[in-house]
Image: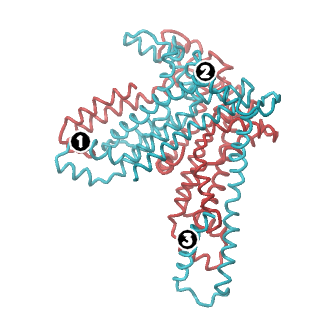
């Protein structure tokens, strides 16, 4: 229905453009018939080309979204037991579940303390590398290569470096005369330890995005500014930063959305410990379903988590509207 | 965090050396300082690799002895690598990862490119709605789907099969969007000439549009492949049998199985890291361009 006005102009333009081509007049099919048969053929072709994607889309995205919502209203268990339809009981239980709130709080805390360094360090690195440094490929290689590692590899590397007695970090601290830190075993430090590993792992991605954006800023801007006597520091703040505005908004939003989904490295390094201090909401979903066997309850928490993601996305759409208005 | 405090003084110094343009400074001082700071950081970034390598080349006794040192008392050895490779699992997991990631990438490319072509070029009823639904689906976070997907795979009897690893991982809505935007830029005239000559849509798509789209197809393929290769949560749930595990999931089981065998842990991690690092060294340019072009739409 909404498609009619949209497709009509497009169809018209392509038809008129076709008409503009000095095509040989003796086209075998008379024009009026061609019109209707072509639009029918376009419908068939369009959906035929879309069908393979659509099949996977319906089966492994749309259907799970629906069946997950249904499951969240039941007492389904992994063991096969099913107490049937229980309405919103899972949701009311979840909202009263202090472990759920704690996991959610941990997730927001991780998102906050990881997003800031992942954006700021990426920008600082990109700005430095973009100052006309030699051997560009070397810096890209060093900062981006960790991004290609699986989370498990990163976790093995860092768990080993965080080892209280045999780890590199405490050894370096000892050399500086600082007493050892329990890193992953200290509830007040563990999340920061996870963040350090995460920054090492993924900052290279944002770094590359910033570097590409910096290189897209026209050189004339800088030349004009330096003729006006603006120094490097000034130029960075009055030219580079404003020009990077849209890139920064996108990077921050993508980073927030990615950080909210954190699971792998936390689960692998601390299993959510010590004492649940680092358990993320995705881990709580995983545990409710696969170690607690409560699929229904787990599905309900999934949807609460989805609600949180939707809020962030709506905030993004809202700010984007405001910016363009 | 250490990195922020390190980079700040350098930026301040750079600022004080006025007047220095941001790029191509006339005085090399700021550039020298930047090079020094970036070099220090780059070395710091390589430390986890270096320390893992040093550990992997030690005997288990040396790896677990204090005080810790980069050079082991009884010399370097390849024992840990040999033991890990003998246990036989890492090569199997590497092949599993390679096969499933390649299959996911191939299916993703075929289905995403064709739907993107349809939306970009064919005027069919409902295409605006289709595009809207695909774009909206970008917001669905994969962890939300793990419970229903597990139930689905269980009822289809596909848990612990390659199917369970591959099928749910081929929907990459952002990539449809990226491809559609690229197809939009290809001049329509090229296709219209072929249409006049009586070529079918499929032929136009495969002989004109796809060959012109090689750069974006490569970028999407790289992105999807890296994501599939490193994915952890879903493969962790979908497979239990050791012979079917992908590399990241297999490593997780090794960690709990070997426990305190640090040298072997690090040797396993390095062996798991190796394939993509080698790929990166060969395709650095394409990968970096791929991240730059699809990165903001992707993840």
Q: Residues within 10 Å of mark 3 (few under 14, many from 20)?
A: some
Q: Chain of mark 3?
A: A
Q: Residues within 10 Å of mark 2 (few under 14, many from 20)?
A: few
Tint of chain A: cyan
Q: Chain of mark 1?
A: A
Say whether residue A147 is left or right of residue B16.
Answer: right
Corner quadrant of residue B157: top right
The mark closer to the camera, 3 or 1, is 3
State the separation of the CA atoms marked 1 and 2: 49 Å
Position of residue B164 relative to residue B59, above or below, is below
* Residue B99 can be seen, yes or no: no
Corner quadrant of residue B158: top right
Secondary structure category for the residue under label 1: helix
Q: If you read the primary sequence from the N terminus, does the residue marked by circle 3 or circle 1 appear first? A: 3
The N terminus of chain A - image quarter:
bottom right
Residue at (65, 75) in percent of width and height: B199
Residue A281, given in percent of the width and then of the height, sits at 60, 28
Tint of chain B: red
Position of residue B119 relative to residue A199, above or below, is below
Say whether residue A4 is left or right of residue A313.
Answer: right
Q: Are marks 3 and 1 in contact (CB under 8 Å)?
A: no
The mark closer to the camera, 2 or 3, is 2
Can you identify the residue that label 1 sits on? A234
State the separation of the CA atoms marked 3 and 1: 47 Å
Q: Chain of mark 2?
A: A
């Amino acid at each position: 229905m909404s498609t009619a006005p949209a497709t009509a102009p497009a169809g018209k333009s392509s038809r008129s453009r076709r008409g503009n081509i000095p095509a040989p007049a003796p086209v075998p099919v008379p024009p009026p018939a061609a019109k209707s048969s072509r639009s029918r053929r376009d419908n068939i072709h369009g959906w035929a080309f879309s069908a393979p994607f659509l099949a996977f889309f319906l089966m492994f995205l749309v259907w799970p979204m629906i069946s997950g919502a249904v499951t969240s209203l039941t007492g389904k268990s992994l063991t096969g037991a099913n107490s049937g339809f229980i309405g919103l009981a899972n949701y009311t239980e979840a909202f009263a579940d202090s472990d759920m709130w704690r996991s959610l709080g941990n997730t927001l805390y991780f998102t906050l303390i990881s997003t800031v360094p992942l954006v700021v360090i990426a920008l600082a690195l990109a700005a430095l590398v973009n100052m006309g440094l030699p051997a560009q490929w070397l810096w890209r290689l060093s900062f981006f290569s960790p991004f290609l590692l699986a989370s498990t590899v990163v976790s093995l590397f860092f768990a080993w470096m965080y080892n209280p007695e045999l780890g590199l970090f405490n050894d370096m601290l000892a050399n500086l005369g600082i007493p050892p830190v329990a890193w992953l075993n200290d509830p007040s430090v563990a999340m920061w330890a996870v963040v350090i590993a995460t920054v090492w792992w993924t900052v290279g991605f944002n770094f590359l995005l910033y570097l590409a954006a910096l290189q897209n800023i026209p050189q004339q801007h800088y030349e004009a500014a330096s003729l006006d006597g603006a120094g490097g520091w000034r130029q960075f703040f009055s030219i580079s930063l404003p020009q990077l505005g849209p890139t920064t908004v996108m990077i921050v939003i993508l980073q927030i959305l990615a950080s909210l989904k954190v699971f792998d490295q936390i689960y692998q390094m601390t299993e959510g410990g010590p004492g649940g201090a680092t358990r993320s909401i995705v881990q709580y979903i995983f545990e409710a379903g696969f170690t607690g066997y409560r699929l229904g309850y787990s599905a309900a928490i999934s949807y609460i988590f989805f609600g949180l993601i939707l809020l962030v996305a709506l905030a993004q759409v809202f700010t984007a509207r405001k910016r363009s208005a | 965090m250490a990195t922020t405090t390190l980079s700040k003084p350098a930026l301040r110094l750079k600022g004080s050396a006025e007047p220095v343009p941001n790029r191509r400074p006339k005085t090399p001082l700021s550039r020298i300082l930047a090079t020094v700071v970036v070099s220090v950081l780059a070395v710091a970034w390589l430390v986890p690799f270096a320390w893992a390598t040093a550990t992997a080349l030690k005997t288990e006794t040396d790896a677990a002895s204090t005080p810790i040192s980069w050079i082991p008392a009884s010399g370097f050895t390849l024992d840990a690598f040999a033991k890990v490779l003998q246990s036989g699992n890492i090569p199997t997991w590497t092949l599993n990862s390679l096969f499933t990631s390649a299959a996911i990438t191939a299916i993703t490319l075929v289905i995403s490119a064709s739907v993107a072509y349809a939306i970009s070029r064919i005027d069919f009823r409902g295409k605006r709605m289709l595009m809207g639904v695909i774009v909206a689906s970008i917001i669905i976070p994969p962890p939300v789907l793990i419970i229903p997907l597990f139930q689905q795979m269980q009822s289809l009897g596909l848990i612990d099969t390659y199917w369970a690893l591959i099928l749910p991982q081929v929907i990459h809505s952002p990539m449809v969007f990226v491809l559609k935007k690229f197809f939009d830029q290809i001049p329509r005239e090229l296709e219209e000439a072929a249409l006049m000559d009586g070529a079918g849509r499929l032929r136009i798509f495969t002989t004109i549009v796809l060959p012109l789209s090689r750069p974006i197809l490569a970028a999407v393929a790289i992105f999807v492949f890296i994501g599939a290769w490193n994915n952890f949560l879903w493969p962790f749930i979908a497979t239990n049998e050791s012979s079917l595990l992908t590399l990241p999931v297999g490593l997780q089981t090794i960690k709990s199985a070997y426990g305190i065998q640090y040298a072997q842990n690090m040797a396993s991690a390095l062996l798991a890291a190796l394939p993509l690092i080698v790929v990166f060294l060969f395709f650095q340019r394409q990968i970096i361009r791929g991240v730059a072009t699809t990165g903001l739409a992707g993840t």
